[in-house]
């Protein structure tokens, strides 16, 4: 039995004693750990950096997922509010969330351009922060397009 093996078995067979030791020697253990880290500074630096590089991609992937989740949640909340608890177009009832958007009820051409600048998350977050101001309705892209076309014709 080599040393590592021996220690592993010892850890299993002397669980209780080790637990007690850790409890009664807290300061000593902390000092030892501190000293060990101080003596292995460079080694740890390399190890930590390696780990950082290894996890970089998965971290990126994770935050992408988190962002999408947050976006979906906020979009859903805002749509439910302006759709009166339903996620569907106020004109035709189309209910695919990906083709729905907020329509500025009294929005003319200029206002439309203005509202376009405020699309997506930033705009939805803004609406929430403003306590859902009135003047918006949930509409599908089709109906919105038709609305703008007819408004243009009236002018
Ligand atoms: Zn529609």
Image (cartoon, rainbow, N blue to C red):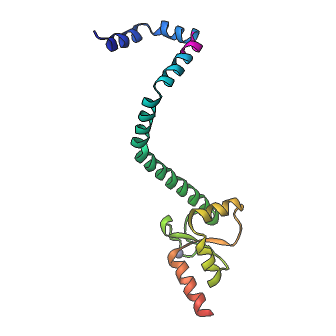
In this rendering, the answer to whether 1 lies above or below 82 is above
In this rendering, the answer to whether 65 lies above or below 75 is above
Quadrant of the image containing the N terminus = top left
In front of the other: 85 or 66:
66
Query: Could you tell me which residue is drawn at 42 percent across and 30 percent down?
Result: 43
Indicate the quadrant where residue 148 lies.
bottom right
Counting from the top left corner in percent of width and height, residue 129 is at: 69, 59
Counting from the top left corner in percent of width and height, residue 38 is at: 51, 24
**Horizontal placement of 8 versus 123: left or right?**
left
In front of the other: 64 or 90:
64
Quadrant of the image containing the C terminus = bottom right
Whether residue 85 can be seen here: no
Counting from the top left corner in percent of width and height, residue 123 is at: 62, 65
**Horizontal placement of 101 versus 43: left or right?**
right
Q: Main secondary structure of the magenta part?
A: helix
In this view, the residue farthest toward the left is 1
Counting from the top left corner in percent of width and height, residue 83 is at: 61, 66
Query: Could you tell me which residue is drawn at 50 percent across and 50 percent down?
Result: 66
In this rendering, the answer to whether 94 lies above or below 54 is below
Q: Is residue 60 magenta?
A: no
Whether residue 154 can be seen here: yes
Q: Which residues are magenta?
A: 25-29
Task: Give the tally of numbered discs.
Answer: 0
Query: Could you tell me which residue is drawn at 67 percent across and 80 percent down?
Result: 106
Query: Could you tell me which residue is drawn at 66 percent across and 63 percent down?
Result: 126
In front of the other: 57 or 84:
57
């Amino acid at each position: 039995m080599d040393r590592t093996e021996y220690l592993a078995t010892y850890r299993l067979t002397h669980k209780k004693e080790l637990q007690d030791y850790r409890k009664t020697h807290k300061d000593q253990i902390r000092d030892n750990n501190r000293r060990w880290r101080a003596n292995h500074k460079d080694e740890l630096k390399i190890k930590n950096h390696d780990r950082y590089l290894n996890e970089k991609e998965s971290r990126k992937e994770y935050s992408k997922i988190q962002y999408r989740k947050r976006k979906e949640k906020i979009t859903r909340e805002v749509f439910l509010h302006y759709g009166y608890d339903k996620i569907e177009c106020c004109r035709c009832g189309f209910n695919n969330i990906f083709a729905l958007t907020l329509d500025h009820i009294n929005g003319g051409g200029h206002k439309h351009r203005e509202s376009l600048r405020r699309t997506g998350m930033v705009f939805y977050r803004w609406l929430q922060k403003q306590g859902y101001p009135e003047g918006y309705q949930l509409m599908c892209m089709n109906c919105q397009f038709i609305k703008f076309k007819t408004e243009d014709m009236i002018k």
